[in-house]
């Protein structure tokens, strides 16, 4: 099943819930168990998830629901997956700064 994540910088929990096809309370629980999911908080404590958070949540959902791992097993598998993945490429600082600037502008619009 190929899930398409819309081209946005930030997503509210309801949108993430629909993308993942799980209830919002499940996402909040996974946040407490898997420290790699760290949504940004607005002044009103509303969660805003980035694309990387959603991708991590999709991986977690796959490990728990399709591969039938327990929470602890999924945590160990995520660590194993991270240690096997190649390190991030150096460089690209200008592009990274542009992305950060764009995301900050979007947060500013949301917060108002």
Image (cartoon, rainbow, N blue to C red):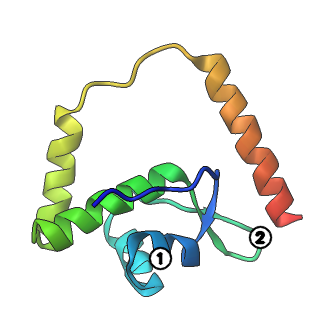
Give how far across and how far down residue 88 sits, in percent: 38, 25
Direction from residue 74 to residue 90 in the image, left or right? right
Instruction: Count neighbours of disc 1 (C-alpha within 10 A) and say few if under 14, some if 14 to 19, many if 20 or more.
Output: some
Give how far across and how far down residue 64 sits, in percent: 19, 70
Q: Secondary structure at mark 1?
A: helix
Residue at 64% over, 52% down:
8
Q: Mark 1 = which residue?
A: 17
Give how far across and how far down residue 48 sits, in percent: 62, 64
Tell me if residue 80 can be seen. yes
Give how far across and how far down residue 99 sits, in percent: 67, 34
How far apart marks 1 and 2 lie (CA) works out to: 22 Å
Comparing 107 with 1, the one in front is 1
Residue at 50% over, 70% down:
16
Of discs 1 and 2, which sits in the foreground?
Answer: 1
Residue 30 occupies which quadrant of the picture? bottom left
Residue 31 disc label: none
Number of marks in picture: 2
Direction from residue 107 to residue 5 in the image, left or right? left
Q: Secondary structure at mark 2?
A: loop
Rendered position, 64 above or below 96: below
Direction from residue 86 to residue 23 in the image, left or right? right
Location of the C terminus by quadrant is bottom right
Rendered position, 75 above or below 31: above
Rendered position, 32 above or below 58: below
Tell me if residue 35 can be seen. no
Residue at 76% over, 55% down:
107
Give yes or no for contact between labels 1 and 2 (Cβ–Cβ under 8 Å).
Answer: no
Residue farthest to the front?
Answer: 1
Q: Mark 2 = which residue?
A: 43
Instruction: Count neighbours of disc 2 (C-alpha within 10 A) and say few if under 14, some if 14 to 19, many if 20 or more.
Output: few
Q: Earlier in the sequence, mark 1 or mark 2?
A: 1
């Amino acid at each position: 099943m190929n899930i398409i994540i819309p081209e946005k910088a930030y997503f509210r929990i309801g949108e993430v819930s629909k993308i993942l096809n799980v209830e919002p309370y499940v996402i909040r629980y996974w946040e407490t168990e898997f420290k790699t999911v760290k949504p940004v908080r607005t002044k009103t404590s509303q969660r805003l998830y980035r694309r990387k958070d959603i991708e991590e949540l999709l991986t977690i959902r796959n490990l728990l629901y399709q591969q039938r791992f327990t929470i602890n097993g999924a945590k160990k598998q995520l660590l194993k997956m991270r240690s096997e993945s190649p390190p991030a490429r150096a460089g690209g600082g200008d592009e990274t700064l542009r992305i950060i600037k764009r995301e900050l502008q979007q947060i500013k619009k949301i917060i108002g």
